[in-house]
Image: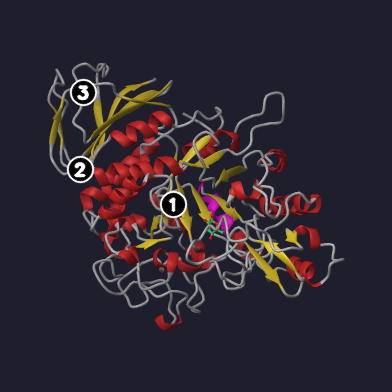
């Protein structure tokens, strides 16, 4: 099957400053990342999503940009970016950049100018209020770390709006010059070799803010424009929206408007599915997933979900009920310091699964067989853990663990000079969990991930074809679903509990020669009448039913 590239991609999310240092200063950089492209190619990833790489005071890990046209000098320069993009392309790997344009850093020259002079051409690039807004203490995204959304600026003598931290003033998207400028920014990076953007905080970019009143309807014309602009400058460029909104609102982020312009975003993160996946894992019950797959809004043919289990932020459970969230917390974040913002978990997957290899495989097999394109966070492929001694979301942003040395092969600098400390204690420490050791071990998690990605590539209908959940009686813990496409059909079985089961698939048409392409262990051939199909505790089986050829 030759679909649009992003539909058959495996996306790998990288924090460049934590991945590989090339110059021994303790900070990962673009040259370091370039030197690891062969590793990534072997893993089978086809697209890198880089967390922000621009100059920034780094008060929100680069999500506070102070120059959209540059590269953070800690990471290298524009030439290094072009070299990375070129080398990646040579290995069939594309690059997506984070487009963080809901807000800038308060140190961005635009904001400096705006605040210092009411007559500045940049004044109305931001959102101001002369009087104290009555809703000043509402709508915070980071409760506990943020106390207001409007802050009085002594220099400007006015209040400015910030959906996120107070050092991230929101850009005013109703100002035409802002739109024109960001269009230039996008064009700039596409020309330098990027293949698209992850749109940070998309719903907040589109909201229209005035002091003291509820935000007006979202302005989707911004997305319409972006889609047209990127399409015009590069036929392959994609927009991937971060929009953690209700299922009803999601399709608007990519839907073509009747009689109007082209589609909007190409891809949307499947936040709802993510939360339900975790609920299903916690309860060892397939029901939340059956429901979530059934409830996934239909997207236009050219659009696609981006699935994930862990990303660079907290695992956000805000869309679950209190009881559901309580169950996920109890199972995977039993201690208070594992939780954050009253809604999420600041841990990596392997440690949430208590290092239980079979359960880690089950979780990722599930993710990689959900409708959509899988997104994998760096280090998950070797089962890295978190460092809860670090503040907030930093806990899951520790340096990549390449080998067992003190610096984990991340950097030759003294570890005390590292951008973040290497995980050096406990079961997930670099000396126990690292690429070099797993590379040598045929049974390692890393080798398993390589196989997972390879098999996924051989089953192009998985994630892309028409999904359906089998309508047969099954144990509560079992999810049985399939994908149909002109090219073929694959049946997926997953057991969310650690208790072996036998399931009856005799009522299912499995075609004439079904055969297993991937499984947690060797189950042998499917018996003829398929009334006693086995599945180990936390087991999974991918069974090819049909090929279109
Ligand atoms: C990003 C966060 C960031 C925030 C502010 C989010 O949606 O994923 O990491 O802190 O936007 O830019």
For the record, the magenta segment spans: 84-92
Residue to which mark 1 is pinned = 41
Cα distance between the residues tagged 3 and 2: 19 Å
Q: Which of marks 1 and 3 is nearer the N terminus?
A: 1
Q: In which quarter of the image is residue 123?
A: bottom right
Structural crowding at the residue carrying mark 2, measured as other residues with C-alpha within 10 Å and reported as few (<14), some (14–19) or many (≥20): many
Residue to which mark 2 is pinned = 538
Q: Earlier in the sequence, mark 1 or mark 2?
A: 1
Q: Which residue is drawn at 47% across and 37% down?
A: 8
Structural crowding at the residue carrying mark 1, measured as other residues with C-alpha within 10 Å and reported as few (<14), some (14–19) or many (≥20): some
Q: Which of marks 3 and 2 is nearer the N terminus?
A: 3
Report the front residue among 119 and 410.
119
Q: Are marks 1 and 2 in contact (CB under 8 Å)?
A: no
Q: Which residue is drawn at 35% across and 58% down?
A: 348
User: Of circles 1 and 3, which is in front?
Assistant: 3
Question: Which image quadrant shows ligand 1?
Answer: bottom right
Residue to which mark 3 is pinned = 473
Q: Are marks 3 and 2 in contact (CB under 8 Å)?
A: no
Q: Compared to 512, does 464 lie above or below?
A: below
The reply to whether residue 197 is visible in this rendering is: no
């Amino acid at each position: 099957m030759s679909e649009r590239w992003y539909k058959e991609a495996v996306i790998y999310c990288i924090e460049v400053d934590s991945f590989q240092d090339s110059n021994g200063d303790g900070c990962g950089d673009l040259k370091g990342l370039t030197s690891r492209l062969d590793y990534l190619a072997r893993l089978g990833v086809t697209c890198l999503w880089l967390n922000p790489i621009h100059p920034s005071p780094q008060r929100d890990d680069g999500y506070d940009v102070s120059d959209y046209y540059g590269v953070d000098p800690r990471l290298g320069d524009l030439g290094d970016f072009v070299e990375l993009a070129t080398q990646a392309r040579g290995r069939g790997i594309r690059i997506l950049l984070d487009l963080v344009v809901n807000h800038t850093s308060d140190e961005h020259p635009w904001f400096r100018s705006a605040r210092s002079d009411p007559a500045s051409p940049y004044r109305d690039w931001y959102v101001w209020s002369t009087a104290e807004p009555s809703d000043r203490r509402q709508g915070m995204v980071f409760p506990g770390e943020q106390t207001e959304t409007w802050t009085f600026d002594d220099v400007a003598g006015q209040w400015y709006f910030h959906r996120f931290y107070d050092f991230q003033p929101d850009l005013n998207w109703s100002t035409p010059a802002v739109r024109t400028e960001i269009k230039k920014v996008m064009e700039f990076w596409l020309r330098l070799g990027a293949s698209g953007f992850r749109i940070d905080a998309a719903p907040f970019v589109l909201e229209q803010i005035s002091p003291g009143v509820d935000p007006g309807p979202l302005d989707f014309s911004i997305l319409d424009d972006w889609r047209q602009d990127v399409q015009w400058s590069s036929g392959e460029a994609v927009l991937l929206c971060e929009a953690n909104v209700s299922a009803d609102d999601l399709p608007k982020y990519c839907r073509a408007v009747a009689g109007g312009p082209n589609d909007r975003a190409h891809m949307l993160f499947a936040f709802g599915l993510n939360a339900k996946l975790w609920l299903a894992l916690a309860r060892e019950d397939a029901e939340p997933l059956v429901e979530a797959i059934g409830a996934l809004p239909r997207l236009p043919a050219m659009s696609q979900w981006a699935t994930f289990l862990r990303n660079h932020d907290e695992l956000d459970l805000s869309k679950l009920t209190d009881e559901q969230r309580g169950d996920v917390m109890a199972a995977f974040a039993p201690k208070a310091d594992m939780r954050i913002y009253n809604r999420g978990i600041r841990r990596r997957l392997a440690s949430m699964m208590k290092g239980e290899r079979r359960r880690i495989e089950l979780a990722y097999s599930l993710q990689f067989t959900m409708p959509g394109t899988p997104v994998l966070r760096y280090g998950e492929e070797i089962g890295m853990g978190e460092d809860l001694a670090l503040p907030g979301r930093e806990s899951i942003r520790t340096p990549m663990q390449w080998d067992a040395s003190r610096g984990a092969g991340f950097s030759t600098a003294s570890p005390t000079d590292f951008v973040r400390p290497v995980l050096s204690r406990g079961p997930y420490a670099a000396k126990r969990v690292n690429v070099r050791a797993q590379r040598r071990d045929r049974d390692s998690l890393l080798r398993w991930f390589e196989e997972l990605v390879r098999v996924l590539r051989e089953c192009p209908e998985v994630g892309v074809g028409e999904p359906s959940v089998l309508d047969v009686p099954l144990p509560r813990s079992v999810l049985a679903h399939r994908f149909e496409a002109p090219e073929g059909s694959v049946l997926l079985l997953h057991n969310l509990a650690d208790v072996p089961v036998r399931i009856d698939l005799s009522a299912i048409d499995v075609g004439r020669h079904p055969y297993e392409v991937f499984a947690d262990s060797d189950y042998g051939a499917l018996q003829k009448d398929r009334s006693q199909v086995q599945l180990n505790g936390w087991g999974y089986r991918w069974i090819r039913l049909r090929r279109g050829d």
